[in-house]
Amino acid sequence: MKKCQKCGEEKELDAFGRHPEGKDGMQSQCYVCISIGTKQWRKDNPEKWKAMRDRYNNHPDGIFQHCRASARTYKRDWQITIEQIYFFVSEGCFITGCKDRVTGLDRIDCSIDYVFSNVRPSCARHNEMRNDMTDEEYIRKCEEVVAWSKL
Ligand SMILES: [Zn+2]
Ligand SMILES: [Zn+2]
């Protein structure tokens, strides 16, 4: 049991998030208090919240976080460092000629986990379009679209 510094309630440890720098490695406030506090803060600071969201969406740190989170969701091993993400973002979308902003990582072989040699930066659209196809399938599908557009 641990006492929440905000609401003062004694709660089970799993009611608290982890916080590596915290005294006991846990957040001092329970999940409920933190989420109430976060919502209130967003309401009171709409400009800052917007800036944070933009930063998150555009920034390598944000890409790192959301890619790692999705790797976790799909139970994929994650071995990409933040430096590698910075490198990928400076490279731009892997599709030749596409200058769109990189929003995520595309696994070259979808059956392999997130390791440096198996990922490429890609923009949201290309990532979505390719989905789980191999390069060959993806290119073939794109060729079909091009052929269709000329009908
Ligand atoms: Zn609390
Ligand atoms: Zn692209």
Image: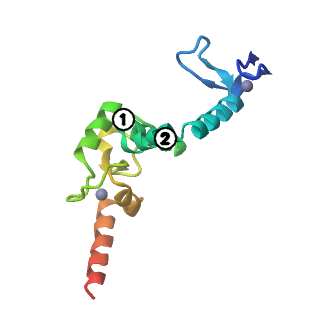
Nearer-the-camera pick, 75 or 25: 25
Q: Is residue 44 above or below residue 147?
A: above
Secondary structure of the residue carrying tag 1 is: loop
Q: Which mark is residue 124?
A: none
Whether disc 1's CB lies below 8 Å from ligand 2 is answered no
Nearer-the-camera pick, 26 or 78: 26
Horizontal and vertical percent position of residue 61: 39, 35
* Whether residue 129 is visible: yes
Q: What type is the residue that disc 2 sits on?
A: Glu
Secondary structure of the residue carrying tag 2 is: helix
Nearer-the-camera pick, 53 or 131: 53
Q: Which residue is mark 1?
A: 80
Q: Residue at coordinates 36% horizontally, 35% vertically from top-left?
A: 80
Q: Residue at coordinates 63% horizontally, 38% vertically from top-left?
A: 39
Q: Is residue 141 above or below residue 110?
A: below
Residue 75 is left or right of residue 64, and the answer is right
Quadrant of the frame with the N terminus: top right
The total number of labels drawn is 2
Q: Which mark is residue 47?
A: 2
Horizontal and vertical percent position of residue 98: 24, 58
Q: What type is the residue that disc 1 sits on?
A: Ile
Quadrant of the image occupied by residue 63: top left
Q: Residue at coordinates 38% horizontally, 55% vertically from top-left?
A: 124
Q: Residues within 10 Å of mark 1 (few under 14, many from 20)?
A: some
Horizontal and vertical percent position of residue 83: 30, 31
